[in-house]
Amino acid sequence: MAAVTVDEILSQIGGYGKYQILMLQLVGFIEFGISSFNVMIITFIAGEPTWECVSNSTVCNITGMVDTTSDDYNARCDMPRSEWKFSDTFTSTVTEFELVCDKSILQNVSSSLFWLGWLIGNLVFGHIADKIGRRKAILLGVFATSVISWVIVWPRYLSVYIICRILTGVSCAGASMTSFVLLVEYSGVKHRSWAGTNIWYFGSACFMFLSLLAYLIREWRYLMLYGACVSVPVVISTWFLPESCRYLLVNKRHDEAVHQLTKVAKWNGKPMPKVELEVPKEIVAEKSDVRDLFYDKNVAKITIASWISWFCCALVYYAVSYGAIYLGGNIYLNFFLVSLATVPSTFTAIICMNKFGRRKSLVAGMFISAVASIISVSIPIDRSNTGYTVGRIIMAMACKYAILVSFNTVYILSSELFPTSVRSIGLGTSSACARIGSFLALYVVWLIRIHALLPYTIVVVLCVITGLICFRFLPETLNKPTPESMEAVLEMKPVEAAEQEISLETKKNAVE
């Protein structure tokens, strides 16, 4: 009986059929109700509303409402608290815990610690998923998020709120990252970009729905209560996810892996071929260890380039997202429009990845983001000029559109770079670097209080540098089999190494 790989089996029983579409719905529900909601809810529950003088104040003589980019933003810090008030637009942790003036930085500290939790979750759940299985790791992450979502609605102390947000970050990371890995591992070689990228549509839908929800529900605790209610059906739906056939095979559970693939074939209406699943000797011998990501010089370059690209994509993506409410105009409409840009970018990423390759798509998205940011920086700051405000919103949409093309691409590219034995660790560490970027994004947005164009200047520099690194060191993985061992990764040499070999071969032929 012939021995074949999982990729070869999927090409016969359906690499993206009814079974994978059903999995996409289940994983997408996790993204919509758990991950994306908790990621972007920070924009509103930690947002800072405008402030204004109280009626008949003898100390405060500022007319109108003052926002974060106004010249009078810090004027209230020299006034008695009784002389000014928050505008009656929405409540948040800022209004409840008085995070203004000397305490304003606590807005970002309390919000960014969520990403610290996410970073920890990536590292911890990467190992958990490789040890106990993808499905159990996802169930653990989703259930923990649901429990914490109910707890966070009630605390009246900032410290309790912060602890809950950190724990939410840990559990969300486990649910999000591991479910993505599971979805990709059930997809065929030619369908990984579709399967892995389509999940972003659920995130985009959540972001746009969130802008409407925040517009209708102005009390931040009620917004969190909505998230707690939605988490319950997500827990129930997660129970129906299967275990990864690749994980089962790597862990010498051959019969269970065959059983799972037989279910895939049945759902997709294809006959299950009578073949033996190939278990490479390298897989059996390998131990999943972060040191394998630095197996040799070429693998180390791939790992570091992956980490840097994830860091850049996350920082730019979330800086633009969180900064949407500071562009001027209606904050809910701004957030909706910037989120809307993610819908076509997801489809664009799929087309570009399949037509031009992963590496070129990743780099192009970063350079376009840099160009959009340069244009945004060049637009004068004048709140009274609607045209300038519209221009900044359009450039923010363009920047988020392009960086999400890169973000979609790096998800797929990284999942195709690391072998099965350390794929979760590889993605986990890469995503951990992204979480550092997400953590810093909130502080980049906070710099708007120093100068409104400073955040976009940082985006330009970061995108250009990262694009050059990725173009030079990352290999192309388009239509290449998923590496099942470290030996297979060694064959995917970085671009510079491949070019050197071609050059040496050319010179050798010329001499001969």
Image (tube, helix red, strand yellow):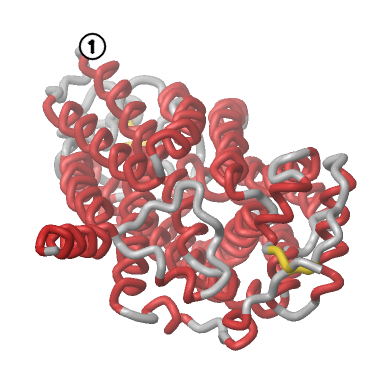
Does the rendering let one see residue 455?
yes
The residue shown at (42%, 51%) is: 410
Q: Quadrant of the N terminus?
A: bottom right
As displayed, is residue 327 above or below residue 415? above
> At which x and y percent is residue 467?
24, 48
Q: Is residue 251 left or right of residue 355?
A: right
x, y percent for residue 224? 63, 47
**Amino acid tagged 1:** Gly
**Viewed as shown, does residue 426 lie left or right of 16?**
left
Residue position for label 1: 387
At label 1, counting other C-alpha atoms closer than 10 Å, the crowd grade (few under 14, some 14-19, many 20 or more) is: few
Q: Residue at x 32, y 23 (%)?
A: 393
Q: Residue at x 62, y 53 (%)?
A: 184
Q: Nearer the viewer, residue 72 or 465?
A: 465
Q: Nearer the viewer, residue 265 or 381?
A: 265
On screen, residue 386 versus residue 432, left or right, reads: left
Q: Quadrant of the C terminus?
A: bottom left
Tell me: residue 138, above or below residue 486: above
**Total residue callouts:** 1
Most foreground residue, 2 or 223: 2
Please report the residue visible at 47 percent of the width from the left and 37 percent of the height from the top. Answer: 354
Circle 1: element type = helix
Where does residue 293 sit, x and y in percent of width and height? 42, 76
